[in-house]
Amino acid sequence: MSTHANVLDDLEWRGLVAHSTDRDALYEHLGQGSVRYYVGFDPTAPSLHMGNLVQILTARRLQEAGHTPYLLVGGATGLIGDPRDSGERTLNTLDTVKEWVDRLRAQLEPFLSFEGDNAATMVNNYDWTASLSTIDFLRDIGKHFPVNRMLARDTVKRRLESGISYTEFSYVLLQSMDYLNLYRDHGITLQFGGSDQWGNLTSGAELVRRADGGHAHAFATPLITKADGTKYGKSEGGALWLDPEMLSPYAFYQFWLNVEDAKVGELLRVFTFLSRDEIESLEAQSAEKPFLRLGQKALAAHVTALVHGEEETRRIEDASAALFGGGDLSALPGTTLAAALREAGAVTSPAAGERAGIVDLFVLAGLAKSKGEARRTIGEGGAYLNNERVTDPELVPGPGDVVGGSWLVLRRGKKNLAGVELV
RNA sequence: GGCGGGUUGCCCGAGCGGCCAAUGGGAACGGACUGUAAAUCCGUCGGUUUAUACCUUCGAAGGUUCGAAUCCUUCACCCGCCA
C-alpha cells in the first residue's frame, strides 16, 4: 500500500506545496506509514469550484499514496465566515448552510475511495461545535490565542481599516479547534488547504501543540492564477463551478481548452493525474507546435473526465471538433451537428408562422443579454449565422438558411456558439 | 449615547440642483492579427421597434422644486473620533 517514492516528492514536483510546516519533518512523517490528514470545505455556495478542485485532487493524490483522508465540510465554520479582503460577509441561514453542506458532500464523494484500509471519512465540524458551551470555548480554546498575534495576521490587519466583526475575527479559533478535535478523536496529524488558508492551517497546528503537546503538520497549495497574476473564473460570468447545473460541462471543457499556453504545464501538473513523463512530453510538444494545442486538449479532456465523467467528455470533444473544425457546417451529417449543438447549448424556435428575426434569435439562444446587445454585436461584425457574418439586423432566417435538417447555427465572436432548432 | 464621514452601474471610483444614463480605471464583450493562446491596436459596454425620443437606475421610503444621484426628513447598514 505504500509508497515507493514519498508522495511529497510528487506534490512538490507538481507545484502543490506553496508553504509547509517543517518540511523535513513532514517528509519523514509521510514516509512512515499511512498518515491521517484532513482538508476542509466551507459551504459558502451551493457548489464547489475550480479552486476547491485543487484540494480535492490533492486529497486524492495523498490517498492513492496510501494515506487516509478525512474530508471536512464546514457546517459550523460556514455559519461564521472566514474573513476575506472584500469585506464582511452576509450570514447565511442555518437552513441554507445545511443544504449546501449536503450538496458539497455529494459533490466530494466521487473523488475519493470510501473503501479499503485507508478509506475516506466525511466529517462535519457542526457536530462538535453546535453543543459546545461558550464558557468551555473561551476557557479551553480561547486561552491559547493571544489577541496581539491574531491582530497581526494579514487578512485581519487589512480588515482592521474597513472593519471586521467579532464573528469573523473568531473564525480562526473554530478552524483551529477542528484540527485539535480531529487530532484527538481520529489521530489526524496533517491538514492542508489553499494558500489563503495558511494562517488558519498554522494556527490549528499550533493549537494542537499548545493544548496537547502534539506534533501536527500542515501545508498549503498555491493559488491558481492566470499568467498575468489575476484570478481565474470569469468564463461565463462567474466561478468555474463543478456543478453541471451551474456551469455546463461543455463550458467547463471550453474553459480548460482555452487556457493560455504559458499556464498549460502548470495546470496539467495540478489538475491531472498524468505522469511526469506524460506531462513533460506534452509540454515539449506544445512548445514545438503550440498551434496544435495538444496540452490544452489533454488538460480539458482529463479534467472534464474527472469532474463530469468519461462519457460526457467524449460527447463534448466530438461536439467541439465538429463545431470548431472550421469546415462547412452543411457538410456535417445532421445527427453529428444536432448532437454537437445540444452540447453547446440549443433552443427551439418556430419554423413557420411568426418566425423570429436574427436579433431575437441571438437573445433567445443566450448569446446576447438584450436586443440592444444583439444589434450592437451585429454592428460590430461579431454575429454569425452558419459561419457567415450577419450584417443586416432585420434578417429573418428562413428554410433556406437551415443546416443539418432543421438547425440554425448562431455564433457570437469566435467561440460563443449556440444552435436554434426550427420546429 | 454624542459628533463627524459614507452607501453610485459587474468591481473600484468621480459627480454634489438642469448640459447626467451619469468622468475615469479595471473586468467583460466585439473587430483586426493569430492557433478556440498571449501581447498589441481599435471599438462597445442600462433597456426599448436606433430614437436631437421614451423608460428604469445613483442604500430604502417620503418630501421640496418647473427640474434631484445632487437639497430636506425618516429608516437601514458601514466607517471614524469621543463617552
Image (spheres, grey):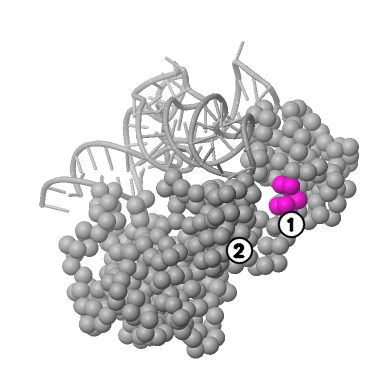
Q: Quadrant of residue A272?
A: bottom right
Is A180 magenta? The answer is no
Q: Chain of mark 1?
A: A
| Callout 2 secondary element | helix
Regarding mark 1 in the picture, which secondary structure is present there? helix
| Residue A383 x %, y % | 70, 35
Question: Residue drawn at (66%, 44%), measured in percent from left and top?
Answer: A416
Whole-percent x, y for residue A315 in the image: 73, 60
Would residue A123 be visible to someone looking at this image?
A: no
Q: Nearer the viewer, residue A135 or A125?
A: A125
Picture layout, residue A163 above or below residue A381 = below
Give the image location of residue A83, x and y in percent: 34, 59
Quickly name the residue at label 2: A302
Marks 2 and 1 share the same chain:
yes
- Choose between A155 and B67: the one closer to the eye: A155
Q: Amino acid at mark 1?
A: Asp
- Gap in Å between the C-alphas at discs 2 and 1? 15 Å
Write down the region rendered in magenta. A319-325
Left or right: where A178 falls relative to A326: left
Number of the label disc, if any, that sits on residue A318 = 1
Decide which of tag 2 and tag 1 comes sooner along the chain: 2
Instruction: Identify the residue at horizontal 51%, vertical 66% (top origin).
Output: A276
